[in-house]
Amino acid sequence: MTMLSRLGLTVPIVQAPMAGVSTPELAAAVSNAGGLGSIGIGATDVAGARAMIDATRARTRRAFNVNVFVHGPVRADAARETRWIEALRPLFATVGAEPPATLRTIYSSFADDGDMLAMLVETAPPVVSFHFGVPSSDRIAALKGVGCVLVASATCLAEARQIEAAGIDIIVAQGWEAGGHRGMFDPAEPDDQLGTLALTRLLVTQTSLPVIAAGGIMDGASIRAALVLQAAAAQLGTAFVACPESDADAAYRAALASDAAHHTIMTRAISGRPARCLANRFTRWGASSRLDTPDYPIAYDAGKALNGAAKAVGETGFGAQWAGQGAPLSRPLPAAELVALLWREAMQQPGSGRPV
């Protein structure tokens, strides 16, 4: 059985989870259009996650994906965090604010969140996906036991082989071009920075699992290219940020529609983990800083506080405006229209405008 038939998809298009941007409305619209819509619950608590799942189910009877973060243990370091706070103090001062006195671990990892596991087993969403790693075998078995199809992101072959060995069903090949957080299992390890094309083909030929290509894919021609590489589907994130159903704020949408879309940067400064976003005041500061960033998500506590203080006075240059390298190709269309357009483009004969 193919991935498409197993999930009931009519088009091989996956909307990336994008915690903080994806909404039940967006996910349901993509699923209803024949793709796989996704919600990201890694940045919320159990009650918030359950509400998002219920809201998505209320809007679609088709399969949808629920994404969780499976980051490793957080290494708190008070001295390092104090240095980070003090380094950020001048940036807070530019918006008339004080930095937090201490930094917190603001997100739990699914690796040790029993309450989140219990909620997912109870609600049994059609698809559950993992970012930053894979959970323990008992958690995988519990989710499979209630019928969830399991997906995990890999940035290299070694991670893909861990996913395969864990008994997960599908791999997302996350290329270097992708927006948002790198799915690296261990961000302290060297990153080979494999592009989407190379990584997808590598995982297709070197593993036995269906592969979803992700990273820089914004239009039908890129989807078609992923399918030629024998990917089972293509995952798009940045392409859906400008949809009216997303939760992106006005500043994020404006930046995506501006020259800023041509200048993405990989940074640890915002959250403590490598992530690709539109360049702004914060990323430029991060590029010049020589400090060791606190662990994810401790550093994110500071980043969110700075962005919140800045937005309160009308400054939007400190936000986490995640975007992939294909950002200039963004089109602000309703999600269902975008899915239909993407698939029409994918079915065109290259260079002719005629269906394949």
Image (tube, grey):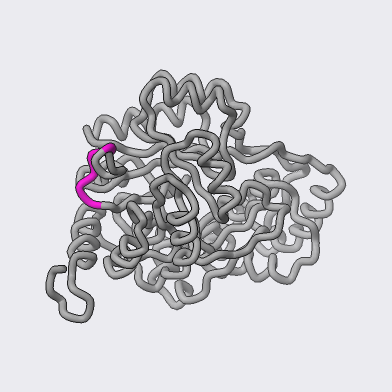
Camera-side residue: 208 or 47? 208
Camera-side residue: 240 or 314? 240
Does the magenta-highlighted stretch encompass residue 355? no
Q: Where is residue 96 in the image (x, y as percent from the top left)?
A: 67, 58
Q: Is 119 on the left-hand or right-hand side of 227?
A: right
Q: In this view, does 57 lie above or below 332?
A: above
Is residue 312 visible in this depiction of the protein? no
Does the magenta-highlighted stretch encompass residue 8? yes
Residue farthest to the left, as pictured: 354
Residue farthest to the right, as pictured: 79
Q: Which secondary structure class fits the magenta region best?
A: loop
Q: What residue is rendered at 27% in x and 37% in y?
A: 6
Q: Where is residue 75 in the image (x, y as percent from the top left)?
A: 77, 40
Q: In this view, does 303 lie above or below 106?
A: below
Is residue 65 visible in this depiction of the protein? yes
Camera-side residue: 182 or 289? 182
Q: Where is residue 3 in the image (x, y as percent from the top left)?
A: 31, 43
Camera-side residue: 230 or 297? 230
Q: What residue is rendered at 24% in x and 59% in y?
A: 338
- Which image quarter holds the N terminus? top left
Q: What residue is rendered at 34% in x and 31% in y?
A: 126
Q: What residue is rendered at 75% in x and 55% in y?
A: 293
Give the quarter of the image for residue 92.
bottom right
Q: Position of residue 173 (x, y in %)?
A: 47, 54
Q: In this view, does 329 lie above or below 214?
A: below
Q: What stretch is highlighted in magenta?
A: 6-11
Q: Is 150 on the left-hand or right-hand side of 54?
A: right
Q: Is 55 on the left-hand or right-hand side of 187?
A: left
